[in-house]
Structure formats: C-alpha cells, structure tokens
Image (cartoon, rainbow, N blue to C red):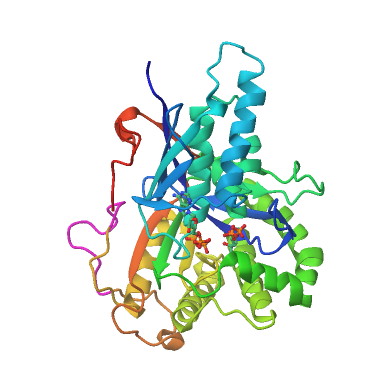
C-alpha cells in the first residue's frame, strides 16, 4: 500500500495593518483586524511533509532537522488534533471506505529556507505549511479561509499565509472564533507590481516574543485601546480600497502610519518594549526623505516606498517594481553590504550594484553612512501566491518515516 504522505510549502506574510493584542489567548483571537501582503515562495518559504502511519507511536515533528517537543495542549498539538478532527468529520464520517487516518499518529518534517525565530515571520509560514500539508494528507475539501481557523491557533499571523496576494484577517466577534478568519482582498495577479525589499538588521532571536509582548500591551497600554477603536477599522477600509485601486501612494501612507503606531503602542507598554533600533530608525529617515522628494509636484507628487517593521529591527520596504533598483542603491549607499547583493530579478546586470548615486534633490544628511554589516543582508522579493502542494520528490521524510534533510 502506498504511504499516506503529503508535502506542501507556504509563504511568509508581512502585515501593513498590524495584529497586536489578543482577546482570547488560547484560541488566538485578536483585538483588531489586520491586513498583510503574502510574499513570493520562490524566495522565502516553509516546506512541510506530513505522513500518517499505523506503525507510528506518537505525533512527532522535526524543524530544520531537529526534533521539537510537541507539548500536550500547546499550539502545535492543537493544530494537529484540530486537523485530525476535521479529517474524521469531513472525510471518514461521510465515506465509510476512507482510511481512518485520524486514528494514526503523524510524523512531520519542516524546513525553513531562511532564519527561524528571527523576526522574519517563520511562525507564520511554518504554521501555514503545517496546516496545508495536513490538509493535503487528509484530503480535506476545505477552502483556505476554513483552514485559516486552524493555522490561527498555531500563530495568529499564520492564518494570513493560507492565501496569496493581499489578505485580511477579520478579528471576528464570536467567542468560538469561527468568524476570525483570513480572506483574500485581492489575488497577487491583481497587483503583481508590488515588490518588497527586506533589510535584515538582525537575524538572531529577539528579546521579547510577539506572544508575550502583545499580552503586556493589552494589559498596560491605554493607547492600544484608542488604536483598536478609532484607528484600525478606518485603516482596514482605506487600505483595502487603495489595494483595489492599485493606489500605491495611499497604500504607502497607511502602511507607514500603522507600523509607526504599532511601535508607539509598544513604547506605551509597561515596561516599554523596543523592537526597532538605531539602524531601523535610520532606514525610516532615508525612506521618509526619499518620499519627501517624490512628493514634490515636479517629481509627480506621490510616495515611492513604504517601510514597515514587525516585532524586531528588520525593515520591509514595499515599493512598485520600477523603484526597487533606486531603493537598493539608496540603502547600500547608507548601509554598505559585506556580501554582494543577491539579485534575483537581475536588476543590476553583470556590473552588480554600483556606488549608489542619490536621487536628485535628496538631502544626504538625513542619516550617516553606517559601518558595513549594520544591515546584514537584503532580500528582494515580491507579492506571491498561497501554499503549494509539492510532488513526492520534494518530500522531507524518508521511507523509514524519519527526516531526510538535516541542517
Ligand atoms: N516550519 C515550521 N514549522 C512549524 N513551526 C514552525 C516553523 N517555523 C517556525 N515555527 C514555530 O515558530 C516559532 C518561531 O516563532 P517566533 O514568533 O519566535 O519567530 P518568527 O515568526 O520568526 O518572528 P516574528 O513572528 O516576530 O516575525 C518556532 O520556535 C516554532 O515553534
Ligand atoms: C508584529 C506582528 O508580526 C505580530 C505577529 O504576532 P504572532 O502571530 O507571531 O503572534 P502569536 O499569535 O502570539 O503567535 C504583526 C502581524 O504580523 O500582524
């Protein structure tokens, strides 16, 4: 009999309207809706293989080749048991001939092709890949929005990685969480021109995790309550409209305002939380100056880039594809690179990135020139699609049910 096995990959997403705060910590129900851009899996992805077999004694999971402890009642265990419940209810209970996979233990191997737990949203792509691979293994007929309810219980932001393009996570109102799901605002094909430049300022584990940080904010910040009630609802409507109209200027204005407000509520937390550092702030100064020049009537009067920061110092700069070459040159001018820029879109040809001339009218003194390595690396990617089901040649589990790939 052929083994019961499936492999999928899932993308990272980076929010423009930030999720920060839970109203239910067990079900992971947020205090506000959020919206993100799904990034292309050609560059950043989690790949996960799941296998069910009657000979397996317990559920086991290996992350990047190292076995993780699946804590009973923990997030990983919840996602696995919820997926088994769906297999039973949606497949086995309606088709008596369907193999009883829900009664078998699973072995799961996952691999991230970028640093884990370093503020690059590995928990988002990781739990999305876990959910998608179990959905493929169990042949669930469920659409991504339904699966997002399960990924959400692994890590809130993971629910948005079940869909490609531009994705909203509705906060929902029900205590059950059944209306707290991810929906696509627009597919990647609607606005493929949106590119992203990730400036890796640090790839080490952060001091305050998102989970504990946001809980402290909920408990202590009055500003968070203002944000939830008076800012986010309008921003969600406005940025959705900007996406549908492909209005980058408005998209950028809202994205930067929301990133800054998210870091303001972190500062309003007691004790305060600082995720950005001096390098992060210098990148903000450079992009703000770039936009000041772009906003001049003689230059077209529209913003050309948008920065956003999650719970760490790394910047993600969204911009239309045509501006990315200029932005990379600008960033490299202030933050010289130790390693040559990997140029996946071939923007710079064989000559490579030049010395980085500034755009005309740019006030060079907005930031100092940093020592090489202040920005450790640049990743150029773009908006992309949702999880992909991969062929058996991509499997991460061997015939013996143990991981093939170690890192
Ligand atoms: N491929 C994966 N499969 C399953 N779980 C994963 C995977 N990758 C990451 N995780 C889980 O996510 C955790 C890391 O989440 P954490 O929030 O600390 O970092 P991050 O997601 O990289 O950063 P941030 O959420 O701030 O962007 C890991 O310890 C692991 O439990
Ligand atoms: C700043 C953020 O990236 C916070 C992400 O928080 P997580 O989804 O990592 O938190 P948990 O639900 O506790 O796992 C903003 C966002 O992605 O919307």
Which of the two residues, 54 or 183, is positioned nearer the viewer here?
Answer: 54
For the point 66% across and 83% down, which residue is it? 271
Q: Ligand 2 is located in which of the four quadrants?
A: bottom right
Q: Is residue 248 magenta?
A: no
Q: Which residue appears farthest toward the top when viewing the image?
A: 97
Q: Nearer the viewer, residue 266 or 191?
A: 266
Point out residue 102 in the picture as x, y percentages from the top left corner. 57, 28
* Residue in the image at 43% along x and 33% along y: 56
The residue positioned 46% from the left and 76% from the top of the image is 283
Residue 351 is inside the magenta segment:
yes
Residue 26 percent coordinates (x, y)? 70, 54
Residue shown at 52%/76% (left/top)?
288
Q: Is the magenta region chiefly helix, strand or loop? A: loop
* Residue 257 can be seen, yes or no: no
Q: Is residue 350 left or right of residue 138?
A: left
**Nearer to me, 241 or 399:** 399
Quadrant the N terminus occupies: top left
Q: Is residue 184 left or right of residue 368?
A: right
Q: Residue furthest left?
A: 350
The span picked out in magenta is 343-355
- Decide if residue 384 is on the left or right side of residue 87: left
Above or below 14: residue 315 = below
Residue 141 position in % (x across, y down)? 60, 24
- Asked if residue 96 is positioned above or below residue 275 in the image, the reply reads above
Q: Is residue 77 visible?
A: yes
- Tell me residue 221's x, y (percent): 75, 76
Q: Count of labels shown?
A: 0
| In the image, residue 369 above or below residue 318 | below
């Amino acid at each position: 009999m052929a083994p019961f096995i499936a492999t999928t990959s899932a993308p990272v997403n980076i929010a423009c309207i930030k999720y920060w705060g839970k109203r239910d910590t067990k079900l992971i129900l947020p205090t506000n809706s959020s919206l993100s851009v799904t990034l292309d899996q050609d560059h950043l992805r989690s790949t996960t293989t799941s296998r069910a077999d009657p000979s397996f004694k317990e559920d086991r999971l290996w992350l990047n080749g190292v076995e993780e402890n699946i804590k009973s009642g923990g997030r990983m265990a919840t996602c696995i048991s919820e997926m088994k419940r769906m297999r039973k209810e949606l497949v086995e209970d309606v088709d008596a001939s369907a193999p009883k996979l829900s009664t078998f233990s699973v072995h799961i191997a996952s691999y991230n092709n970028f640093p884990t737990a370093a503020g690059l949203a590995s928990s988002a792509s990781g739990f999305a890949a876990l959910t998608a691979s179990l959905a493929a293994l169990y042949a669930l007929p469920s659409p991504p929005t339904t699966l997002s309810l399960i990924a959400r219980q692994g890590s809130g932001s993971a629910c948005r990685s079940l869909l490609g393009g531009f994705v909203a996570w509705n906060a929902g109102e029900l205590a059950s969480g059944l209306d707290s799901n991810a929906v696509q605002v627009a597919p990647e094909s609607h606005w493929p021109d949106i590119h992203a430049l990730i400036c890796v300022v640090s790839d080490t584990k952060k001091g305050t995790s998102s989970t504990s940080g946001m809980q402290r904010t909920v408990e202590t910040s009055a500003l968070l309550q203002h944000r939830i009630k008076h800012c986010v609802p309008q921003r969600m409507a406005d940025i959705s409209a900007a996406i549908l109209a492909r209005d980058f200027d408005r998209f950028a204005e809202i994205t930067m305002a929301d990133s800054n407000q998210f870091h303001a509520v972190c500062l309003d937390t007691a004790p305060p939380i600082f995720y950005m550092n001096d390098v992060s702030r210098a990148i903000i100064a450079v992009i703000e100056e770039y936009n000041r020049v772009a906003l001049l009537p003689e230059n077209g009067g529209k913003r050309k880039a948008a920065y956003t920061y999650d719970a760490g110092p790394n910047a993600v700069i969204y911009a239309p594809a045509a501006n990315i070459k200029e932005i990379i040159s600008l960033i490299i001018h202030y933050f010289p690179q130790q390693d040559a820029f990997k140029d996946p879109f071939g923007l710079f040809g064989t000559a490579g990135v030049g010395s980085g001339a500034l755009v005309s009218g740019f006030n060079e003194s907005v930031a100092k020139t940093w020592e090489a390595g202040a920005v450790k690396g640049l990743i150029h990617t773009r908006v992309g699609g949702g999880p992909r089901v991969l062929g058996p040649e991509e499997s991460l589990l061997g015939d013996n049910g143990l991981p093939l790939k170690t890192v």
